[in-house]
Amino acid sequence: MKLLRVGAKGTERPALLDSEGVLRDLSGVVQDIDGALLADDAALGRVRAAAESGALPALDAAGLRIGPPLARIGKIVCIGLNYHDHDHARETGAEPPAEPVIFFKAADTVVGPHDTVLIPRGSVKTDWEVELAVVVGRTARYLESAEEGLAHVAGYAVAHDVSEREFQIERGGTWDKGKNCETFNPLGPWLVTADEIADPQDLSLRLWVNGELKQDGTTAEQIFAVGEVVRYVSQFMTLYPGDVVNTGTPAGVALGAPDPKPFLRGGDVVELEISRLGRQRQVCADA
């Protein structure tokens, strides 16, 4: 299923994109799309039955804002430098990690897939990163295998891990200052349930800036595959339904480009997509 949330910020309603590409209203079946729904097999079963019945009301998609596909996100765990050494690790001058690199984004960085991305005040190095987001559907603690890790995934979505490199790298401390600026995690358009993605290591990722292709990779190049990432993270923290894991980005970010590096500015347009998970488009604006 392709689950999404539509409407003005703060008043989004749950919806579903059916197999014919018609937007359907789910508000008569569930209150929202969140961790509680993803952990409730009976509720998900009602959604599936409603979708298969063909009786869900159609929504007029014209002019309708698409919000983040998941409400009440608990935490966003991010994996850094997770593509092989000829990709993102090499271009940023870092060695491929022996274990996954973990950092966090606050849940309030999440916006809809087509919402404005704000360039922070004082920023000169705002950068783009297309990423596969993994949405947790079952409580995960001390998992023993990558297979168990995959079994705890409810679905997948497109994430844009916007980053301010000066704040992240040159201002001391951890990466968090460059990762948690307002609007720095567009998510969606859909949450695609895990049953529709037979192999999360077979997804292509692309990102364009002002129409120019910048990133063109595949999750097959991940150093740590999705199931292993979930297993590994569960050794250090409990993952709950509705938590999100951003799994890293392939080569092609501004930080790895020759000087002068083409960091984002107000007015730039970023478009990104992951095969079978949909497409995003953001116009950047000065905060």
Image (cartoon, rainbow, N blue to C red):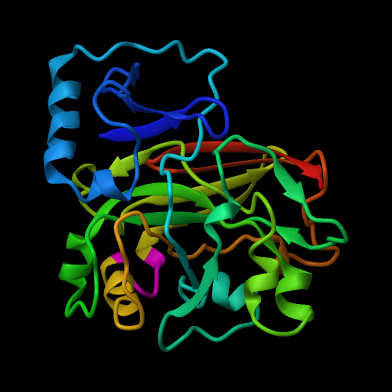
Marks counted in the figure total: 0
- For residue 146, above or below residue 132: below
Residue 87, visible in the rendered structure:
no
- Residue drawn where x is 51% and y is 25% of the image: 7
Q: Is residue 160 visible?
A: yes
Q: Residue 192's spot in the image, x, y percent?
A: 31, 41
Residue 42 sits in which quadrant? top left
| Residue 33 coordinates in the image, percent (x, y) | 34, 39
Secondary structure mainly formed by the magenta segment: loop
The one nearer the camera, 158 or 252, is 158
Task: Name above or below for residue 196 compared with residue 58.
Answer: below
Query: Does residue 81 appear to the left or right of 175 in the view shown?
Result: left
Does 208 sit left or right of 277 as displayed? Answer: right
> Which image quarter is the N terminus in?
top left
Question: Which of 256 and 69 lies nearest the eye of the viewer?
Answer: 69
Decide: is 194 above or below 263.
Answer: above
Q: Is residue 225 magenta?
A: yes
Residue 284: give x, y in percent of width and height. Answer: 75, 42
Camera-side residue of 264 and 50: 50
Tell me where the magenta segment starts and ends, as one range. 221-226
In reply to whether residue 29 is colored magenta, the answer given is no
Residue drawn at point x = 21 percent, y = 63 percent: 150
Q: Residue 15 vs residue 121: left or right?
A: left
Query: Residue 145's image quarter?
Result: bottom left
